[in-house]
Image: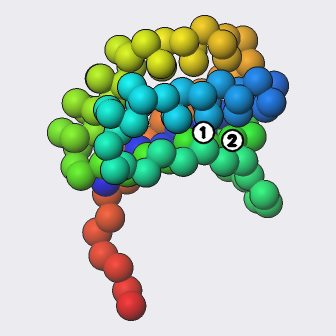
Amino acid sequence: YYAGWLLDVTDPATYATSFLKMANSDETSEIMGDRLLQFGSWAAGGASVPATHWIYVNFANFVDYMSTMEQMYASEAFQLHLQEIEGTYKVTREFTEELILVFE
């Protein structure tokens, strides 16, 4: 199970610095455990909505997504991140995905 956010970021340096600080905090590490927390930008093509960057996170299932993100949104690390990036971004799309089949 995956969750993603597409972002339109106007100050990438500020956003990336704050995101890395939040992602590498002890509090975030404790909440996220071994889940992948990824942040990137479009190299080519882009998205169907205005977006310069993306965040992608994996979860065990929908319940894990909801409970983990509830903890994350309430954390001091995330709240500080929101303060530091205020006015530098807009979430243009939020989505979840569930893997159905892998062809090998």
Task: Give the image location of residue 94, x and y in percent.
Answer: 48, 36
Q: Which residue corresponds to the image point at 34% horizontal and 50% vertical from the top-left?
A: 34
Kind of residue sitting beneath label 1:
Leu
Report which residue position mark 2 lands on.
53
Classify residue 57 as left or right of residue 9. Answer: left
Q: Cα distance, mark 1 to mark 2?
A: 6 Å
Disc 2 marks a residue whose amino acid type is His
**SS for tag 2?**
strand
**Relative to residue 91, is residue 39 depicted above or below?**
below
Residue 18 falls in which quadrant of the image? Answer: top right
- Residue at left 29%, top 23%? 70
Q: Which residue is mark 1?
A: 6
Q: Is residue 53 left or right of residue 58?
A: right
Binning the other alpha carbons within 10 Å of mark 1 as few (below 14), some (14 to 19) or many (20 upward) gives: many
Screen quadrant of the N terminus: bottom left
Secondary structure of the residue carrying numbered label 1: strand
